[in-house]
Image (cartoon, rainbow, N blue to C red):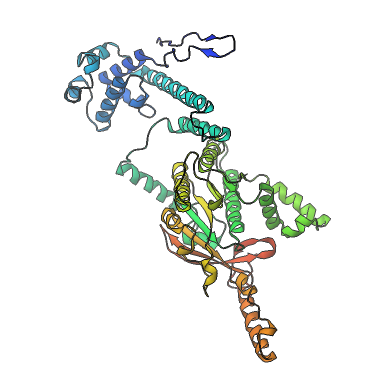
Amino acid sequence: MNQIDTTQTESRAGDGSLLGLTQRQPPANMQAEQALLGALLTNNRAYERVSDFLTGAHFADAVNGRIFDAIARRIEAGQLADPVTLRSEFEHSGVLEPVGGMAYLARLLTAMVGIINAGDYGRVIHDAWVRRQLIEIGEEVVNNAFGARPELDGVDQIAAGEEALFRLATDKGQDGGFTSFDRALADALDVAEKAFHRTGDVVGLTTGLRDLDKKTGGLHPSDLLILAGRPAMGKTALATKIAFSAARALMREAEDAPPGTQTKGSVAIFSLEMSAEQLATRILSEQASVSGERIRRGEIGQREFDRFVQVTRELAQLPLHIDDTPAISLSAMRTRCRRLARTKGLSLVVVDYLQLMRPSVGTRPESRVLEISMITQGLKAIAKELSVPVIALSQLSRQVESREDKRPMLSDLRESGSIEQDADAVMFVYRDQYYLQQRQPKETAYDSTEKYQTALEDWQRKMDLAHNRAELILEKQRHGPTGTVHLFFEGEFTRFGDLDLVHEGGYPPS
């Protein structure tokens, strides 16, 4: 099998620059294209050897590509594809006119190869296409570096180049299209079978919270979940708890897998507000049951420090990755998620929080509402493309504070229209204790000691009921019920857990 070598010798100028780059012909192998088409026309079974990786778009000659697509359509429809059955289609479309009409098909038959060699010829064609795409990407990188897109700085150009390379490595250049209903049914049945064989209520990735898993069935691929709340409600602590629990579940799944089984999965946290060290300290504080404030001030004894070391060794094995780039752009986030998915596997993405993100490089939204809309749409696209759940934290507007009942509603979301529309689930964190603390009665506000004592006792009773309790209000869930999940919250360690409604005090079960 001879391959055309279209590479011309490059020359170098005295200053080291390359000459003759534009004169070289793109990589192609016309003999391989014609030989493969001849094999397909002679024996349709040859299509089975190339159908999983080759399309008409991979052919260097556009006519050859359209012939391949026509052959593929008939074969996949269960029909015979040969010069006789394809004649009317080609004569009607005029596809073969530039190459001499139907006589070209006759020439293809003389160039045919055996069915055994069809796969090798297909890979030669695909490899030439990959190298042509690499040339295009390289040209774009060079042009951008010379200033073709002045709105991109150097870092953004790196991100754009990585994104293009990742797309080439994973998508194989095939554009999205229709999925046949029988294929969709097969995928749905596969999901149902996995759920059937699983024990308990969790079908997706666990959140580490029993009652939340019961309501949602866990975290599901392709879902965008919004976790919102006012400042100091514990959004980051709850998101960290979910990310940690998911990473621990993935680690245990990998440990329990049969020997030789390749298991890949990890959790990515994009922390735009807190540094990676601060986030790690929060997780360490929660797991070691030592106050984060005491850790920062160094008020810990030898026994607590030894516990830190032990917990750190256990946590170090978690498949958890933190990116604390401030004001990261949507395009950079997408590129890093793709890279992590390719190298270590990706099972969950957490973004803290979406109002601190920037839209994709090169876009200039006219308003903040449109900008947030572009970001939420982009996060949903990442969830679908990589087939992972994405949890995005969001701030709430101040109008919550003006109501008597400060439990959040969908209308309280900042730039709420786009967020509510794109999300598969919207959850609000609410702690009544936070607001009650601010309403402690003051003796000067009452005209008698008796009235003050009555108000103070009523306030203390409400504080006791709200102590160490939080509410996770599931306001929207596209694939399941809504409602409120009651959680245990320990402010000293910023720790969320399951609420024990059986025993007095509400502490999580040991």
What's the residue at 41%, 30% (across, down)? 173
What's the residue at 50%, 61% (across, down)? 427
Residue 279, x across and y down, in percent: 66, 51
Which residue lies most toward the right here?
Answer: 302
Locate the C terminus and report the quarter of the image it occupies.
Answer: bottom right
Q: Is residue 33 visible?
A: yes
Q: Nearer the viewer, residue 318 or 127?
A: 127
Q: Is residue 64 above or below residue 7?
A: below
Q: Is residue 1 above or below residue 344?
A: above
Q: Is residue 221 visible?
A: no
Residue 175, x across and y down, in percent: 37, 34
Q: Nearer the viewer, residue 203 or 197?
A: 203
What's the residue at 66%, 48% (across, down)? 275
Query: Which corner quadrant of the image does residue 113 belong to?
Result: top left
Q: Is residue 34 above or below residue 471?
A: above
Residue 424, x across and y down, in percent: 43, 55
Q: Is residue 290 left or right of residue 20?
A: right
Q: Is residue 177 left or right of residue 99?
A: right
Locate the N terminus and report the quarter of the image it occupies.
Answer: top left
Q: Is residue 483 left or right of residue 260?
A: left
Residue 212, x across and y down, in percent: 52, 61
